[in-house]
Image (cartoon, rainbow, N blue to C red):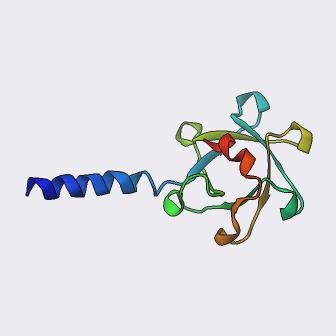
């Protein structure tokens, strides 16, 4: 019986880490940001295609599926949207469908960890 509890607990803990979205918070000043992003006009220009989630628990982390939090303390990254591409760390394109999200430039994946 004790072994069953240990197995259940380990499954519960391991799944808890796999159901959280990439949580972002949009800041108004670049000096507050962990990450500066530029929204490109076309998908083929982006490093990352992003799908904006309605609910926090809909995605795995670093898959291009972002949930924007209401509070900066709940976010993994504080994001500033730049006006110019050369000021950004990451170029993103917002997609309409969840399955279209993902990395196009794998070299930049480390930015989101």
Q: Quadrant of the N terminus?
A: bottom left
Residue at position x 87%, y 37% from top? Answer: 87
Q: Position of residue 105 (x, y in %)?
A: 77, 53
Q: Quadrant of the C terminus?
A: top right
Residue at position x 61%, y 52% from top? Answer: 62
Outermost residue toward the top?
A: 31
Q: Is 24 or 93 nearer to us in this picture?
A: 93
Instruction: Write down the quadrant of residue 5 in the picture.
Output: bottom left
Vertical comparison of 70 with 53: above or below: above
Outermost residue toward the front?
A: 107
Residue at position x 69%, y 34% from top? Answer: 34
Q: Position of residue 33 (x, y in %)?
A: 71, 33
Q: Position of residue 53 (x, y in %)?
A: 61, 61
Relative side of 100 to 1, left or right: right
Instruction: Write down the quadrant of residue 26 in the picture.
Output: top right
Relative side of 18 to 52, left or right: left
Q: Is 106 or 39 nearer to us in this picture?
A: 106
| Count of number-bearing discs | 0
């Amino acid at each position: 019986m004790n072994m069953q509890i240990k197995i259940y607990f380990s499954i519960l803990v391991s799944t808890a880490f796999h159901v959280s979205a990439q949580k972002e918070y949009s800041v108004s000043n670049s000096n507050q940001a962990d990450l500066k992003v530029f929204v490109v006009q076309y998908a083929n220009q982006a490093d990352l295609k992003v799908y904006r989630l309605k609910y926090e628990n809909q995605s795995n982390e670093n898959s291009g599926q972002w949930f924007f939090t209401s509070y900066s303390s709940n976010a993994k990254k504080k994001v500033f949207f730049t006006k110019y591409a050369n000021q950004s760390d990451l170029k993103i394109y917002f997609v309409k469908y969840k399955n279209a999200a993902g990395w196009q430039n794998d070299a930049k994946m480390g930015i989101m960890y």
